[in-house]
Amino acid sequence: NLKKYFPVTRGIIFQHTVGQVRAVDDVSFSIERGQTLGLVGESGSGKTTIGRTIVRLYEPTSGEILFSGKDLGKARNDELWNMRRQVQMVFQDPFASLNPRFTIGSLVAEPMHIYKMGTKQEIQDRTKELLDVVGLRPEYIDRYPHEFSGGQRQRIAVARALALNPELIIADEPVSALDVSVRAQVLNLLRSLQRQFNLTYLFISHDLSVVRHVADRVAVMYLGKIVEIADRDELYLAPKHPYTRALLSAVPIPDPQIEKKRQRIILTGDLPSPMHIPTGCRFHTRCPMAQDICKQVEPAFEAKEGREHYAACHFSDQVTSPIAKV
Ligand code: SF4
């Protein structure tokens, strides 16, 4: 039941609140240890806010964030300090997330110095080891971020995230800023690190084809809410929400024979403002299947057929896959 609302204020000297942006609006999900949950949705759906709230870059408005039984949302002082060691984040833009004035050695070593994880020599040895783990030569330790390509910079960001031996990594669009040619390499690296260190990932992306490559389960977000969650293959073959169906219809298919027969669903209109969420089902203003009831009654987020498959739609039994028919 996590909520994160941002107040909207007006005025320069005398500020007053004129409304609130309901960026994350009563969201619940779980991730099993060693697994990857893909969190998908278009820009403004609230997926990045969830990631940032979990690592406490934002304070939650209400709800719980349970990590190994402890509520991260209420952690203070020592507890927060320890939590920050176990939960790390990899950001979208490796050009912005690495300080250009520091060598990559000091960037990767910095968290270990802060957490006093050994002597100077031990930390330097571990830094070289981490560079090796992410596929970079340890001799690069004294180079600066500008000497590396986008893919290599994201590897450095991953090495920095691994420095504190975290259990959960929140990867926020980790390959979106990269050239298509290097995306697969970074995704494969994340997968192999997961096996090697038994990592758990919350993988945030707007791209269902990327998520399909890495996730065990997939949650689809729309306007601050999760509208569907299911095991990856089940979600791709048998979606239960019209929004998921529309997203699936936009995933490129490399086989021209299959591509020819695939249904395209074009959603009209823009994502409504999270300050003015539509009544009833929040997707009704753009849903090709909307009926009168959808404008008035908010659909419950409930179990559908299949293993742990949940969706919020009055007519989920009529939703078909745009790809399964071919
Ligand atoms: Fe579309 Fe109605 Fe289902 Fe909402 S409840 S997704 S508007 S069919």
Image (cartoon, rainbow, N blue to C red):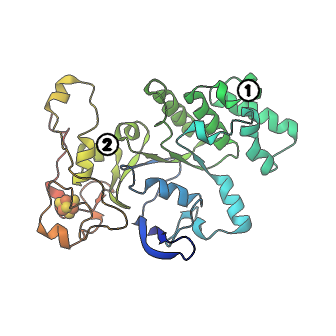
The residue at the point 52 percent across, 42 percent down is: 92
On screen, residue 313 above or below 298 = above
Which image quadrant: the N terminus? bottom left
Residue 70 percent across, percent down from the top left:
60, 67
Q: Is residue 96 left or right of residue 123?
A: left
On screen, residue 226 above or below 217 = below
Tally the numbered discs: 2
Residue 134 percent across, percent down from the top left:
62, 30
Residue 170 percent across, percent down from the top left:
54, 49
Mark 1–mark 2 Cα distance, whole angstroms, equals: 42 Å
Q: Quadrant of ligand 1?
A: bottom left
Identify the disc placed on residue 143.
1
Q: Is residue 196 visible?
A: no
Q: Is residue 48 left or right of residue 140?
A: left
On screen, residue 11 above or below 205 = below
What kind of residue is marked 2? Asp
Q: Is residue 109 left or right of residue 87?
A: right
Number of residues whose C-alpha sits closer than 10 Å to that of mark 1, classed few (under 14), some (14–19) or many (20 or more): some
Image quarter of residue 181: top left
What kind of residue is marked 1? Arg
Foreground residue among 137 and 107? 107
Identify the disc placed on residue 233.
2
The residue at the point 19 percent across, 56 percent down is: 287
Number of residues whose C-alpha sits closer than 10 Å to that of mark 2, classed few (under 14), some (14–19) or many (20 or more): some
Image quarter of residue 208: top left
Mark nearer the viewer, 1 or 2:
1
